[in-house]
Image (tube, rainbow, N blue to C red):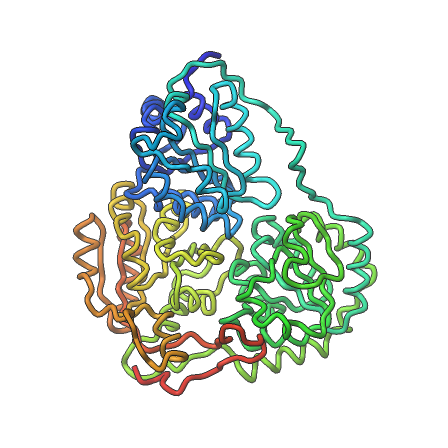
Amino acid sequence: MKMSGAQMVCEAIIAEGVDTVFGYPGGAIMNVYDEIYKQNAFRHILTRHEQAAVHAADGYARATGRVGVAMVTSGPGFTNAVTGLATAYMDSVPLVVISGQVPLSLIGTDGFQEVDAVGISRPCTKHNYLVHSIEDLPRILKEAFYIARSGRPGPVLVDIPKDITGEIGEFVYPEHVDLPTYKPRYKGNDRQIKKAVEAIVNAKKPLLYLGGGVVLSNAYESIRSLAEMGQIPAVETLMARGVMGAKNPLLIGMLGMHGSYAANMAMSETDLIIALGARFDDRVTGKLSEFARYADIIHVDIDPANIGKLVDVDYPIVGDVKTVVDKMLPMLEKKVDPDRYQVWRDILARYDELHPLTYNDCGDVIKPQWVIERLGQLLGEKAVITSDVGQHQMWAAQFYPFDRPRQWINSGGLGTMGYGFPAALGAQMGQPDKVVVNITGDGSILMNVQELVTAAENKLPVINVILNNHFLGMVRQWQTFFYDKRYSETDLSFQPDWKLLAEACGGAGYDVTTKEEFDAAMEAAIAGGKVTFVNVAVDRFENVLPMVPAGGALYNMLLEHKEQCDG
């Protein structure tokens, strides 16, 4: 069928089953937007910033497990999108971002709104394309979706010059993709899997170390079965919260810089790490020379580049986590003895008794941890929780009772302030039956606050709970601990009127200073059906604890701070 390049873009999106696209138009992408105007097969959400468009597509992808799609124009439109690409790349989120480019004849001439999108995005995309001919466009679009969702997922950029979107060509959308140099390995090596099973059977202190790859692989049911079958305790990374379920007695907790005491001690004392879809990030390992000194390591990951990158691995298995674990289960069922690990489980339970996750709920000032706990009591599994980056993110990860994967959406690898609100919009589009709550801070929320208009226009009732301590809280905490309380440029005492700001953009706002007011505000926000700011005044100097100081050993945690109740 003959059609323009712009029509081909829309037809490919439809063929891939995409129901929502996020974007912002401009000159170089205008031909594609003209075709979007003529179709009704998918919905386009006009964000108010290109960064927000990519974050929204990212939130949609994380909430649904499908490929998120965003569109931007050339030059500043694309450069605004780079943070979104980098955020998705670090957390292995499947995205296809389609950018307009100046006509082929102008590339390299410093034309108006020209920028080298392929060159700029190379370090922060799984793959990228500059389309050189109309004949290549259908194949490239097909490959882009395939690469984004297969293997270790990630963002793919398709940069299309404006003259190609206006050119007429033959559109035959490929049914299959064959890339000789890209063949993800899913099954895992059977011999290595058998060796790993024997290691589990012979271990005395095995520990499941669960990463974000478990969520991407949709492997949580298999992993819960593995843990239950062997009664093997488990720790989750920031990206894996919800995999085991908050009420599972085998879940020790989150590990890492702000992980629980029991989880970090488990990783320090285990004799066998069963790493599934995790990448041994520096915020998990702490000082590498002191990390898990007594443990052999099984590492299952679909990306061979992750295995052995930071730690020596005794049982490397390249493959899809779910596929590999499903192979392990029948082997373990015949051999594993759950009673063998009882002493180990008792030790970890004692660690949790000694230093549980806790806080001092003292005085009249609301503690931020209480807000998270209360949200869990009010909403539980009914909610999808997004967050920005900072103290509020860590408190959410520590204290919200996540029951399932894809319930918790945050920027783990890049740590992008301003991510949470647009990601929540994408999550709401992907899961319209859920209450979507963005847990944010008074610093982060301002970085994409313009999306209030997007939410109001599209009737997306995202609830933004602002834990307002009038600080860039996490930076302030480091300044307290390590910089002799020199609070350089972290005081945010000058603030907008959050209630009026939300109302001015078509939403609702509530100011909260008591627990009773918080309950009333949440009840009104849930019933109100519109984007909402719930501005909660919390203890200014509350710290996120435990904390492993940067470069320190995982077992060497700060567990308390004498000023915790100063308010």
Q: Position of residue 375 (x, y in %)?
A: 38, 65
Of all residues, the one furthest to the bottom in this rendering is: 562
Of all residues, the one furthest to the front in this rendering is: 109
| Relative side of 340 to 387, left or right | right
Q: Position of residue 185 (x, y in %)?
A: 69, 43
| Relative side of 492 to 58, left or right | left
Compare residues 119 and 383 and report the one nearer the observer.
119
Residue shown at 43% from the left, 32% from the top: 159
Res 186 quadrant in image: top right
Q: Is residue 62 visible?
A: yes
Q: Position of residue 356 (x, y in %)?
A: 52, 79
The C terminus - image quarter: bottom left
Q: Position of residue 314 (x, y in %)?
A: 75, 62
Q: Is residue 267 visible?
A: no
Compare residues 159 and 56 and report the one nearer the observer.
159
Residue shown at 47% from the left, 24% from the top: 132
Q: Is residue 407 above or below residue 201?
A: above
Residue shown at 30% from the left, 58% from the top: 445
Compare residues 101 and 30 and report the one nearer the observer.
101
Compare residues 478 and 68 and report the one nearer the observer.
478
Q: Is residue 237 above or below residue 181?
A: below
Q: Is residue 207 above or below residue 152?
A: below
Total count of labels: 0
Residue shown at 56% from the left, 84% from the top: 354
